[in-house]
Amino acid sequence: MNPLHPRPRTLRLASGLILLTYVATHLLNHAVGLVSLAAAEAGREWFVAFWRSAPATAAFYGALLLHFSLAVAALYERHTLRMPPLELARIALGFAIPLLLAFHMVQTRLAWELTGWNDNYRRITASMWASNFSLRQLAMISIVWLHACFGLQLAFRHRAGWRRWQLPLVALATLLPTLAFTGYLAMAREAFLLPVQSRPPTPADATLQLAVETVFYLPLGLLALTLAARWAQVAWARSGGRVLRITYPAQAVDVPAGFSVLEASRAFGIPHMSVCGGRARCSTCRIEVLSSAGPLPPANPDEAATLARIGAPPGVRLACQLRPTAPLAVRPLAAVRGSTPASEAWGANAEREIVVLFADLRRWTTLSEHHLPFDLVYVLDQYFEAVGDAVREAGGVPNQFIGDSVMALFGLETDTVTAARQALTAAEAIERRMAAVNDSLAAEFRRPLDFGIGIHAGTAAVGTVGYRDTRTLTAVGDAVNTASRLQELTKLLKVRIVVSEEVLRRAGGESGDWQRHELEIRGRQGRMAVYARTTFCAAPAEAGS
């Protein structure tokens, strides 16, 4: 898309981040009040110097008007208010903000512009304390902050990096407004004990009162007009017979022209996945268009970018963006389950950053030729138990046992730094446990078993797959394929473990005991830096197949 004409979601996010920066710095300034009123006033001088400068003023009020305008436009485009609770709460809180902030904004910034009145912390906090304004101040802080947090969660929750930092961000999002409000209380109590500095009446008071009413009632009126116009358009479409039929696999529904497929699903209670809230930031609402009585509207830039990112084939569209103009038949591609299987407790059915470990048993073919099948089952049980216990104790999930190979996942409940360390710990524990297995099997099988391990970190789609009641947690993606290829390299390099440079970097380990190689990995373009070692033990062990 032309960079001079950014997409609406880009404008919404950019304007929201400007407003969030203002609010966060304002709350941080409030929090300094826990030190003293004087310290908060000193911080306010810096805050005011920046945010009341001409560039920052233009950026702030431009972002404020743009964000509100985009919200009104988005609400007008909605044909149903049926939506997930988080999405509904974000919208409701957003439209409540102007109503709560009208008086505060006018009596601070506008009063300073019109009368030159110094709206410092001493005057404002003492005034609010004397008029029992504290609860309203708490409500303002809570609603503004919650709206911002909900918006960020809806915008980024499908991204692996956001999920990785989610716990620290939640802690920060809880701590900052708490410190800000307690800082305000500390300043208000201190200021209330000082001589009152009330603002004398000025000819601008009538203008300020009019501004308060305008800021309060104008957004309220725009909201009412938007809802009325939306309902009138839907009613007109229904009464004029401008409806079209959308056929799902289980039922068909008639909706007014202009409905998106996702809105049709929500309006009739049809389960339909939508992680990002219908803003084309993810592809979970994607559908396959089975047939259409007429040409489909072309994908808008947001939808086209998302479909291109996932490599969607022809006939696949985003339900949140497709507003059909003719009857059509669709099939949602992401299933919505009524309950969450135990295997999905780690946040499955999502793209995320993980660490993957592949372990493969060596000399299995030779062993199979010289021993009975039940003996081989016994050996596999010993091997699987050794690997599975090592992985679980390190904090990973051994989730696939296929033939003589095991795949384990790390990072389903932790960040990738911890996951990388856990995977290396598991590899070392596998070696110790396999040494014990070899000791116990030495008398029967004479030749010790060996193994190879490959570890890689990257993005993968984690979810449950299978047929009917036979389902299992798995991971799919480049990270999984690469980890498998690294395990295969252990045969070529005659070592027991090969890890990608990414794993060693994230784990923060020293590379002195590792052999560095730059190799071409099957299925990947270019050369890749990997690190190999024969053993974690002091005495090298025989490796190879």
Image (cartoon, rainbow, N blue to C red):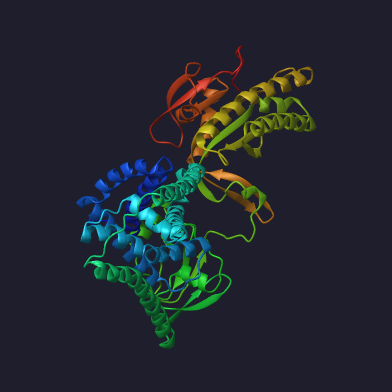
Q: Quadrant of the C terminus?
A: top right
Work out whether residue 397 can be spotted: yes
Is 508 positioned to the left or the right of 49 in the image? right
Q: Position of residue 510 (x, y in %)?
A: 48, 20
Q: Is residue 244 above or below residue 501?
A: below
Q: Is residue 206 above or below residue 113?
A: below
Q: Residue furthest front?
A: 195
Q: Is residue 320 above or below residue 283?
A: below
The one of 429 and 402 positioned closer to us in this rendering: 429
Is 224 positioned to the left or the right of 329 in the image? left
The one of 32 and 302 positioned closer to us in this rendering: 32
Q: Residue furthest top?
A: 539
Q: Position of residue 450 (x, y in %)?
A: 65, 22
Q: Residue at 43% across / 70% down in the picture?
A: 260
The one of 280 and 361 positioned closer to us in this rendering: 280
Work out whether residue 319 can be spotted: no
Is 495 positioned to the left or the right of 212 in the image? right
